[in-house]
Amino acid sequence: MKRTDYAGNITESYLGQEVTVKGWVAKRRDLGGLIFIDLRDREGIVQIVVNPETQAQELVDLADSVRNEYVLSVTGKVIERASKNDKMKTGQIEIEATAIEVLASSKTTPFEIKDDVEVLDDTRLKYRYLDLRRPEMLANITMRHGVTKAIRSYLDNTGFIDVETPFLNKSTPEGARDYLVPSRVNKGEFYALPQSPQLMKQLLMTAGLDRYYQIVKCFRDEDLRGDRQPEFTQVDLETSFLSEEEIQELTEGLIAKVMKDVKGIDVTLPFPRMSWDEAMNSYGSDKPDTRFELLLQDLTEIAHKVEGFDVFSKAEAVKAIVVKGAADKYSRKQIDKLTEQAKQNGAKGLAFVKYDEGEFTGGVAKFMPGIADELIARLGLKNKDLVLFVADTLEVANNALGALRLTVGKQQGLIDYRQFNFLWVIDWPMFEWSEEEGRYMSAHHPFTLPTKETEGELVAGDLSRVRAHAYDIVLNGYELGGGSLRIHTRELQEQMLTALGFSLDDANEQFGFLLEALDYGFPPHGGLALGLDRFVMLLAGKDNIREVIAFPKNNKATDPMTDAPSPVADKQLEELSIKVEQAD
Amino acid sequence: MKRTDYAGNITESYLGQEVTVKGWVAKRRDLGGLIFIDLRDREGIVQIVVNPETQAQELVDLADSVRNEYVLSVTGKVIERASKNDKMKTGQIEIEATAIEVLASSKTTPFEIKDDVEVLDDTRLKYRYLDLRRPEMLANITMRHGVTKAIRSYLDNTGFIDVETPFLNKSTPEGARDYLVPSRVNKGEFYALPQSPQLMKQLLMTAGLDRYYQIVKCFRDEDLRGDRQPEFTQVDLETSFLSEEEIQELTEGLIAKVMKDVKGIDVTLPFPRMSWDEAMNSYGSDKPDTRFELLLQDLTEIAHKVEGFDVFSKAEAVKAIVVKGAADKYSRKQIDKLTEQAKQNGAKGLAFVKYDEGEFTGGVAKFMPGIADELIARLGLKNKDLVLFVADTLEVANNALGALRLTVGKQQGLIDYRQFNFLWVIDWPMFEWSEEEGRYMSAHHPFTLPTKETEGELVAGDLSRVRAHAYDIVLNGYELGGGSLRIHTRELQEQMLTALGFSLDDANEQFGFLLEALDYGFPPHGGLALGLDRFVMLLAGKDNIREVIAFPKNNKATDPMTDAPSPVADKQLEELSIKVEQAD
């Protein structure tokens, strides 16, 4: 029998008609001499009823024998339900079965197929095909398609051309660690899976494509965190001849379309812009969560007046956040926990005072008298306020307080989780100092265009002063994506690579094809990439991208379902001329 | 200055207006005291004119200094052209420049940027970004986007959900050779890049997605031919609860939409169906080019009556094609060439006769007398017909004549290249005998559903008799794609793997997750995959998929532009615990 419609679509409009539906048994029960089966498919659940008084014994026996997750084809007449369920789309009707076919049986599933079921992460992944049957997971995966559909629709309508770039690329040491693919034909050589199609999309600009996009898998062999996966999906775009603002405007249109199509929300355009300096100084983060205030306050000048407390008076920076009315809410123990967090973020410690009725108590209260009035005025202190200070380098003070701000914001219930706060962070530094590497590294990547005013420093030497035509798009404290204008002349690109410590030989070895391309009429260009997984995760209200990926890896980069990665046959390695080194 | 419109879009509607265009210098010439520049962008070419009588010397000097492939921003007034060019979209107007800015200069390009330029393949690939500037290549890449847009539109509107499946998978030895990716976290283990998302899409069916699609990169580490690449793109789809015919009907709708949107062609639906037996017997191919006849004729019975010529009388099969009126067109030398081709396809030789005025001449004419009348009647011979015979096993006769049929069809101009002949080849055998492996192998893959009537042979033993619910879609002699219904019970899947020589241990080791999934209510399902590269290639009228891929590899699986694959740093290999084995 051909299916009439999805089970979840059988509503009053089918009343009196004979229909056939196909799906999974969500529940079977006997009630008042009747057998009821909830049949589930991707659109929802419909109730089947088998009436022993009117149906053949064979059908009754069959209905009696089915168990949860059996796959059935059911034919019957749509009738009005005796006891209606207004919460269900199909709740006004039921199907009186006249024929049932068991298309597949099922053993008892390792966990129940319903939302909010308690299962170990790895069990969910091992039986991902069952996990995906849960309505919530199905909704996430379906929403993901809704997002890509909206993105494609917008980009197709604004002149972008979808172009596929290669997955088997050249390995370049700059940036994150590559996944390598040994070549069989070219023994001893390797392809690398793309960390992003950055250079390919730039080459498409000099090819004249003008507007390129791709929704594409990228790969980074880094240690995994909650919102990282070895493979992730990027909405990648690039344009020629546009300004930073024009690219941002296009991106805003794209995001507005997604928000409208997927969430039914009209976002206000343009999104706010915030300089990187402002973000770091006021939010202690290059991806500020602007759903709440609790801004970082600079008290350096005041703190330098404190006597007998070098921690404050001699610090490069003293900054603070004021937790309004929270003085009694934080015990010593809780403040110790915050101190621990501050230390994890590089601070030597966390100072605090509580304010009430003109008095400071606790923590560093004894050092306050000399600066009390100034501090109260500067911070606008009210009774029961708690002040948390970090005295350190400016960078450490910002980072530590930025992290505390998020923790305290959550603890104090300051965040409105219904809000979607988009924000551009602009005016980025070109480089950041890497303690680990002992050198300046690109804050974005080595193809980012420095500003005209500061590009001279590439050669003159103070790399900390070089600013980039770079912009990140931030949503609720997450970096949703980032982009920049790119360098489009060989001279500047060579200066950039030299500034990053490349010898001319190395630069040519690794990026020679780009440098050569810059010789042949390379247009001004720029673009952006959005993290699709993260975007969908935030739209779905989740805090782990695994919830919006059909078959993700666990945090050991393995798939408990297929057991990938796994050992391979010796013959396979021989053909590739590679050997696994035994551990000592 | 902001661009008003693409250069190629500046037509009469802009007459009298000031516009700004940005693009590449396609040509610069002095004529009658004026300087003309053809400015090219992705939409076409517009003519710029600089008039020394009205413009500042500075502008004139600048216009004089630009060379081919410089990138310019040009502002000026759109005026009517003195000498119109009706062949160009912009041929009625020109832009009288009032300002020109050189956005990028260019060295002389290694080849001229125009269609039909003679360049070595590897030079084109080394400078692919220049190659892509050629209007024909740009059109191919743009058409490719048109095709995927049409496909997505159709599938989105017929209830399909686009789901991304993983690129880092488990390696399975069945099928083609995998590309491997060493794992750093799990030393000594490897991921494999997907040859197709076959099992993942089947799991999505048991997850309840009902209709899945994806346009996705797949990878096979095989030796390369003209229309193969290490990575290729597949339009992949899968459905639950549908019959073979319903899946074919959906696919036909998909193809009709592409043909209409991209080529403006209304194809006739449904496409013809041909059994695999009929395809092999009449066309000598499982992917018949039905744009011309020249069918294979079975003469076995007649040939067995020939006396004194064991080659015919004792052959398992004697088959022939009749080249109408071509007797005088084929010299001995040309027939030798055809014989060579027949031998390359496994035949021991090629026999021929020419027919004229009731007489046979040449080749095996002397053996004809006894069967002449019967042969003439059977083949409907007319004057000047050439008959080419292969006497061998049926399989060899079919293959060899199938190949000759294509060669002769081309030589005789029998093919109408404007036609798009779609065809379903159905009723496939489940297995084909591999001489190389000395065993039966899956004609499609081990998850294909055998027919009810023949599935018993999986256990009973004659694998040659098992038929599959499989169907290939063929276009103009190319396999465009293939699909099947899939096995959805554990018992049958285990029988299939056993028939293919898997021990139960091996089966569980490699496909355990699928076998286990079959225990939990796995719905009947089936699907199809189309080769996107090949489809676009045929739509573009090309004979190599490289012409429709932005950055393909050459036939050594390398990219002459980036030099991928390449040696990598020792540190990278150490981290992966692998070592390259030195050649002896």
Image (cartoon, coloured by chain):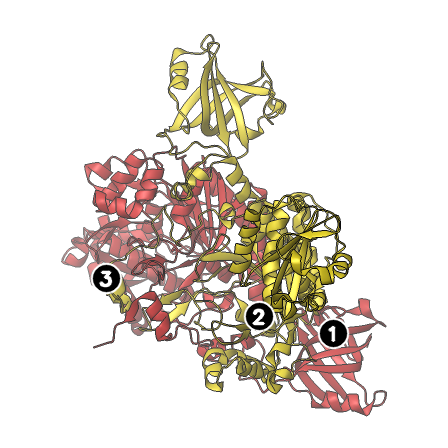
Chain colours: A red, B yellow
**Gap between marks 1 and 2 measured at Cα:** 34 Å
In this rendering, would A284 be left or right of A536?
left
Residues under numbered marks 1 and 3 in contact, where contact means CB atoms less than 8 Å apart: no
- Decide if residue A459 is in sight here: yes
Residue B571, labelled with which disc?
3
**Is A479 placed left or right of B152 in the picture?**
left
State whether residue A573 is above or below residue A465: below
Q: Which of A525 and B447 is in front in this view?
A: B447
Above/below status of A118 relative to B273:
below
Q: Is mark 2 on a helix, strand or loop?
A: loop
- Residue B387 at x, y percent in the picture: 67, 54
Q: Identify residue type, mark 3.
A: Lys
What's under tag 2, amino acid-wise? Ala
* Quarter of the image with the C terminus of chain B in it: bottom left
First in sequence, mark 3 or 2: give its number: 2
* Image x and y of residue B491, in percent: 59, 85
Q: Nearer the viewer, mark 1 or mark 2?
A: 2
Instruction: Give the residue at mark 2.
Output: B443
Relative side of A266 to A270, left or right: right
Q: Which amino acid does label 1 sit on?
A: Val
- Nearer mark to the viewer, of 3 and 2: 2
Q: Which residue is drawn at 83% across and 87% down?
A: A55
Which residue is tagged 1?
A21
Spatial CA span between label 1 and label 3: 58 Å
